[in-house]
Image (cartoon, rainbow, N blue to C red):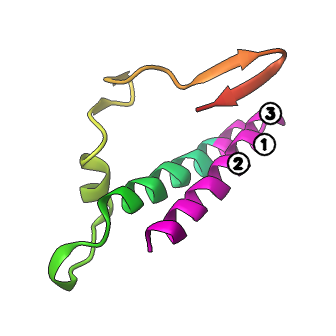
Amino acid sequence: MIKYRLGYAKNYLEDAVALFNKGSFNSSASRAYYASYQAMRAALGDPEDGKIWRHLAIIKHFVSGYWFAPDHPKTVWEQGGRWHII
């Protein structure tokens, strides 16, 4: 299941970069969000005892701070006339 989720994350991230470079910023943000979400699910693995992960429970393992004051560095940069997303 980890390879499956990481595959989805990689595909979503590639889509996000392509959309960003075309100026489709809202669509790029959506794909980047789902790329990170799938990567987080892969990192956590399946929950114990046959339970399911809740959306916010997954995110809280990795994200702190608020959107207007994040606790992490920026992950977008411009190089050679193209925008890149880590």
Looking at the rendering, the stretch of residues picked out in magenta corresponds to 1-28
Q: Is residue 40 magenta?
A: no
Q: Secondary structure at mark 3?
A: helix
Rate crowding at label 2 as few (under 14), some (14 to 19) or many (20 or more) other CA atoms within 10 Å.
some
Q: Amino acid at mark 1?
A: Ala
Q: Is 24 on the left or on the right of 31, as rendered?
A: right
Pick whichever, 37 or 67, lies toward us.
37
SS under mark 2: helix
In the rendering, at what x and y percent does residue 31 appear? 62, 51
In this orientation, which residue lies closer to the viewer: 71 or 23?
Answer: 71
- The residue located at (62%, 54%) in the rendering is 10
Of callouts 2 and 3, the N-terminal one: 2
Q: What crowding class fits label 3: few (fewer than 14 Cα within 10 Å), some (14-19), or many (20 or more)?
A: some
- What residue is shown at x 75% (from left), y 15% (from top)? 79
Q: Position of residue 58 (x, y in %)?
A: 30, 57
Which residue carries the number 3 mark? 21
| Residues marked 3 and 1 touching at CB (< 8 Å) | yes
75 lies left or right of 77: left
The quarter in which the C terminus is drawn is top right
> Alpha carbon of mark 2 to alpha carbon of mark 1: how far?
6 Å
Q: Which residue, as the protein is rendered here, is positioned at the far left?
A: 49
> In this rendering, is residue 76 above or below 28?
above
Q: Is residue 26 magenta?
A: yes
Give how far across and how far down residue 22 sits, in percent.
Answer: 84, 36
- Main secondary structure type of the part rendered in magenta: helix
Report the residue marked by disc 1: 18
Q: Up-down: is 13 above or below 41?
A: above
Quarter of the rendering containing residue 51 = bottom left
16 w.r.t. 77: above or below: below
Q: Which residue is mark 2?
A: 14
Q: Quadrant of the N terminus?
A: bottom left
Give the farthest residue toward the bottom.
Answer: 50
